[in-house]
Amino acid sequence: MRLLGAREFLKTVKPGTLFIEFWFSDEQECRKLIENFKNGMSVEDILKNQYGSYHIFGDNGGSLAFIIPALEEDEDITTIDGHEYNFLFYYDKNIVGDANPATSLNIVFDSPEEWSERVPVTPSGYEEPSRFLYYDDLERIRNWFLKECGPFRDEVNDKSAWALKALNESNYYKDNWVVDYKEER
């Protein structure tokens, strides 16, 4: 499991990877998350202290989030291998573009063995989760996402990819400690 800033995230994370995005308003919140992560605080306890949301990474153009819609008429049911899900939301969740790379960090689960026993599905409005995904669900959803929503852009090798290039060339992000942050445990 790793805690990564935007640059290391885009350089190393592959499509289909489960991660939690933390998007803060200032660096102090980043420092608090880093301290908790370094001290070995569980992911569940980190999420009790700071808001973060689970996603399955696609590319900088979009990832899959788990969000229970506020209104029933907003539900879009996706059936995967006979299982119905009404909270899969593929959108233009950008590592660079939406969130500010200077105040966002991501906990990355590099393998299914690192996944939490249960992953909360976020209701609209950030109330307490009322549903959870388990290993079989995550694996099924990840495989569907890669097949149905790909192919995804390789930020390192695709010459038309812009996000990592922007981080590397922008003076604002070039030497930013949050953008460059990486910690493994």
Image: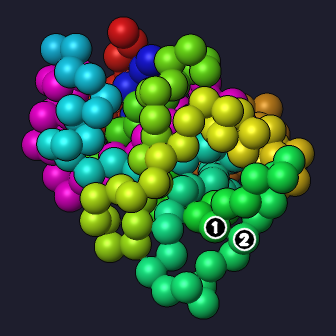
Amino acid type, label 1: Asn
Task: Look at the image and tell me whether residue 100 can be seen.
Answer: no
Dot 1: what SS? loop
Q: Position of residue 167 (x, y in %)?
A: 50, 43
Is the residue marked by circle 1 packed among few (<14), some (14-19), or many (20+) residues within 10 Å? Answer: some
Residue at the spot 61% in from the left edge and 43% down from the top edge: 56
* Up/down of 79 relative to 22, above or below: below
Q: Position of residue 169 (x, y in %)?
A: 52, 43
User: How far apart, in angstroms, are the residues tagged by discs 2 and 1?
Assistant: 4 Å
Q: Residue beneath label 1, please?
A: 86
Quadrant of the image for the N terminus?
Answer: top left
* Up/down of 104 relative to 177, above or below: below
Amino acid type, label 2: Ile
Disc 2 and disc 1 in contact, CB within 8 angstroms: yes
* Up/down of 68 relative to 107, above or below: below
Residue at the spot 32% in from the left edge and 73% down from the top edge: 125
Q: Which mark is residue 77?
A: 2
Question: Which of the pair 13/146 is nearer the observer?
Answer: 146
Is the residue marked by circle 2 packed among few (<14), some (14-19), or many (20+) residues within 10 Å? Answer: few
| Horizontal side, residue 93 vs residue 4: left or right | right
Magenta stretch bounds:
9-37
Whether the magenta-drawn stretch holds residue 11 is answered as yes
Whether the magenta-drawn stretch holds residue 22 is answered as yes
In the image as oriented, which residue stretches furthest toward the top?
185
Residue at the spot 41% in from the left edge and 31% down from the top edge: 107
Question: Which of the pair 82/164 is nearer the observer?
Answer: 82
Dot 2: what SS? loop
| Horizontal side, residue 2 vs residue 148: left or right | left
Task: Look at the image and tell me whether residue 28 can be seen.
Answer: yes
